[in-house]
Image (spheres, grey):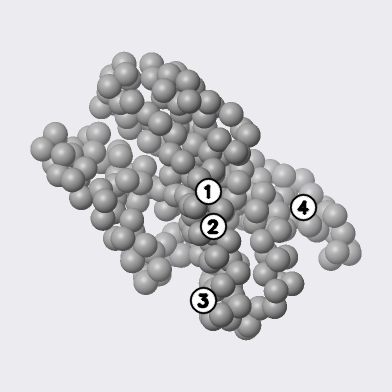
Amino acid sequence: MPSLLRSRGAVGRLAPSMSLTAVLAEVAIVTVPVLAAIVFHEVAHGTVAYLLGDPTAARAGRLTLNPLPHLDPVGSLLVPALLLFLVPLLFGMRPILFGYAKPAPVDVRRLRRPRRDAVLVALAGPAANLLLAAACTVVLAALPYPDDPSSAAQALRLVAMAAVQVNCVLAVFNLLPIPPLDGGRVLQAVLPLGTARWMRSVEAFGFVIVLTLWFNTDWGYLAVRRLAGLFLAWSR
C-alpha cells in the first residue's frame, strides 16, 4: 500500500528555507523507519493471506523482511527522492514524503472465507504499523534522555520518534475508506456486491481523491497528530 508522510512541524506547513544539509539530516532520520514500516505493512498482508489459505504472496517471495522485493523503482525510489529534495530546495518547505511499494499479491478467491478473510487481510497492514508504533514507543521509553544532543542515544531517540510518526501516518492513510487503500478494501468486502463492483470501477481515481483531500485539508494531519500523541505520551 502507499505510504505518505507530510511534515508539518514534526510531520509540514511552510517552514524556513532548508539547507541541503538539513534535508539530508531529515532523510537520514526517516529512511530506516519508512522502509521498515512499508516492509512490515506488506509482509503483514501476505502473511495473513497465507494463514487464511492464499499462498500467492509467499510464492512470489514477498514474505521476507528484505526490502528489495517490496520496492517499486519509481514509487519507492524516484518519486520520494524528487519530493524530498525538490520541495525543500525550491519552495522552502519541510520535506514531503510520498511513495508506494509493490502491493503484496493477494488472490481473494483462494481465501477460505473470501469476504470475511479479505477484511482481515486488508486490516493486517495498518495493524502491523500500529504494532510497530507501539514497539517504538517502548524503545523510546527505555532510552535515557542524553545530555549531549549529538550523542548516539539522542540519534536513536530521533529515529524512534520518527518511526512512531511514520507508522501512524501509514495506519491513518491506509485506513481511509477509499479504494485501492486498505480501508477501501474493507468496504468492498462488507458492502453489497453491486456497490462493491461500483467501488472497484472507480478505483483508478482513488489516489486522486485521497491525495487531494490529504494535501488540501487538515483532517489527516490532525488524525496523525492525535494518534502519534497518544503513543508518545506513553513514552514519557
Residue sitting at x 15%, y 44%: 198
Query: Mark 4 or mark 1, which has the lower sequence index?
Result: 1
Element carrying mark 1: helix
Q: Quadrant of the C terminus?
A: bottom right
Above or below, 211 relative to 63: below
| Of marks 4 and 2, the one in the foreground | 2
The alpha-carbon separation of the residues under discs 4 and 2 comes to: 27 Å
Question: Where is residue 2 drawn, in percent x and y?
Answer: 44, 49
Q: Which mark is residue 156?
A: 4
As drawn, 199 above or below 91:
above
- In front of the other: 225 or 90: 90
Sequence-wise first label, 3 or 2: 3
Q: Tag 1: residue type? A: Pro
Q: Residue at x 50, y 32 (%)?
A: 44
**Mark closer to the chain start, 4 or 2:** 2
Q: Which residue is mark 3?
A: 13
Q: Quadrant of residue 38?
A: top right
Kindly report the distance in space between the C-alpha atoms of the residues bearing marks 4 and 1.
28 Å
Query: Is 81 on the left or on the right of 26, as rendered?
Result: left
Image coords of residue 154 (percent x, y): 80, 58
Which amino acid type is marked by label 2? Leu
Task: Work out how far the residue at label 3 is from the one at label 1, CA to CA, in angstroms.
Answer: 28 Å
Q: Earlier in the sequence, mark 3 or mark 4?
A: 3
Circle number at residue 73: 1
Numbered disc total: 4
Q: Nearer the viewer, mark 3 or mark 1?
A: 1
The kind of residue tagged 3 is Arg
Quadrant position of the N terminus in the picture: top left
Callout 4 crowding tier (Cα within 10 Å): few <14, some 14–19, many ≥20: some
Whether residue 124 is visible to the viewer of this picture, yes or no, is no
Where on the picture, by quarter, is residue 212?
bottom left
